[in-house]
Image (cartoon, rainbow, N blue to C red):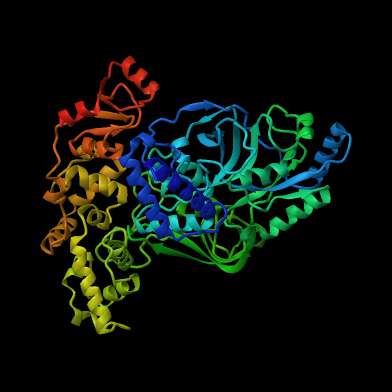
Amino acid sequence: MTPEQHIKKLRDALNEHNYRYYVLDEPSISDYEFDQKLKELQKLEEAHPEFFDENSPTQRVGGTITKHFETVKHRYRMYSLDNSYSKEDLIDWEKRIEKIIGKKVAFSCELKYDGASISLTYENGKFVRAVTRGDGIHGDDVTTNVRTIRSVPLVLKGTDIPDSFEIRGEIVMPLDGFTTLNAARVEAGEEPFKNPRNTASGTLKLQDSSEVAKRPLEALIYNIQGEEMPFKTQYESLKKIRSWGFKVPNAAKLATNLDEVLQFIEYWDKHRHELPYEIDGVVIKVNDFEHQKELGFTSKSPRWAMAYKYKAEQAKTRLNKITYQVGRTGAITPVANLEPVALGGTIVKRASLHNADQIEKLDVREGDMVFVEKGGEIIPKIVGIDFTKRKPSSKPTTYISKCPECKTELVRLEGEALHYCPNVKDCAPQIIGRIQHFISRQAMDIQGLGEETVSLLVTNGLIRNYTDLYTLTKEGIIPLERMAEKSAQNIINGIEASKKVPFERVLFGLGIRFVGRTVAQKLATHYRSIDKLSKATKEDLMSVDEIGVRIAESVSNFFATEENMEIVERLKQHGLQLEISEADVKDKTDKLEGKTFVVSGVFEMSRDELKALIEKNGGKVTSSISSKTNYVVAGENMGPSKKAKAESLGISIISEEDFLKMI
């Protein structure tokens, strides 16, 4: 078997496995086997760059940086849908249709996915472009990001595939994936996302496609646009495009009359919470394409389609008590404790009140009958009060002025919505929260030590901050509740092993406000040691790529605090990694310091290796050519548009050999 044949065989196999896993939900091999095949393909492609294919399964991982998303005109306009909220609306709509068509029509009933609309272009059975809805006439080209979504087929399967067409669908984030993503963000000290829809939409516009690849997006398809399609009805088209490899949910139903449409609407109003993703209604379409053409469009919407929107889910219950939670950063969150009430398929006992401003705006009080709404939010929220049920003896809510845990006077920073407890040293929830963050998987990853054990250690006075972990002994731990000798030894072993965790994860573990994993990585790479970082001014910090005022102030304030510097010194004494080792930097130079490169084409070495060499020698790699670009490293098959732009801007175009001579 030739290398080319081997590569093709692996690509076909991986595409099929990918289809079975992400579209059919019927995996045929284990994740490990899939990863091994993918690694094998990557090695072959690196060894034979002449067989590069942008639609190879290896291109799913992303890595391309897009600073500015190009605006593209849709070949077929993306219209909005008219909305209806009642049976009467649909009856009137059906009458208008029958008046134009002259007879009864059938309908395709489909779920209205709550995500971000997308248009995918395919030519000769291959994925070419992805464009957001935008204003319906123009949208943003997000091809590099959508390419990472596993349920978007890069190469189609089956027969009767038109030479060129556009597929319309919705990019959604399944509820399980959204919950997992938010749990990771909370663990990383970052704000959780509010709802799946906004998260999916925002993810499509991330600049780094490798970050998009990490998020659990799916593409649910509902429409095709093109010439000479091999089907005559909407319902038939859904079956056909599903056979080509697209993810088309099986919920769609053919309705021969409006009664069947209403049954579909009623069924999914009751059962929508059983779905793995959010919907906000159903879409009803005239099934026959010839009838659709005859009905045509208004200036904004097709006359042959209607969206039936479900009302935002609300429930009324009593607010028994307002309590306040203290986070690891000292942020105070008010929580409404409710009489349990059924809402959105779950029993709701608590709802978010967000902050003091929200409480004042709603004039919410203990004892009130309140309206609670889910409406896509991860945590139910109170949206109104039934003032007719308010007791005459009711008194306005006075927001607490002291920490509910340590009784310290709260502060409210300028421009901030939340109140904070400034007692970082003695407020138990803050102490416990910071240590729990420090030991978390994405920070120090201390094996054997869980959140409950941290609480026990703090409560029993064995530790006061995360540096105290490194003075613990097995004998000191064993007396704790439900602690055996083996468990105690595992904790000590895990703490000792954490001394080898690299600097960027230690930095993240310190729990500096607004410093998530990515920011910690950038700061560690730039400053290379905690000593240099601690001496950086706010202005110095803001010169680091993607570090803004808020992060710079937070980092500067952290190291300006004497207690924090004492903690850093203790961590040094315990032998933690607080600098990037010489082994990591010995091959680094500043030969390309201040120079910006664009890499385009096929080279002897892999593109990733070439980019790594640029960065190792102090240079910066970007994906698009601009006036700030110093060099374009050009290989075989360099894009003609990039070459023309580089020449028009007078940017030096160098070969791989020229670049290697530079370093």
**Horizontal and vertical percent position of residue 571:** 15, 61
For this rendering, which residue is in front, 388 or 294? 294
Residue sitting at x 34%, y 70%: 451
Q: Where is residue 31 in the image (x, y as percent from the top left)?
A: 43, 59
Quick check: can you spot residue 195? no
Question: Which residue is pictured at 27% across the width and 75% down the height?
Answer: 457
Name of the residue lying farthest toward the right: 102
Asked whether residue 257 is in view, the answer is: yes
Residue at position x 32%, y 57% in the image: 329
Q: In this view, does 507 lie above or below 82?
A: below
Screen quadrant of the N terminus: top left
Q: Position of residue 66 (x, y in %)?
A: 39, 34
Q: Is residue 564 above or below residue 137?
A: below
Residue sitting nearer the eye, 348 or 405: 348
Q: Quadrant of the C terminus?
A: top left
Q: Judge left or right: residue 288 versus residue 658.
A: right
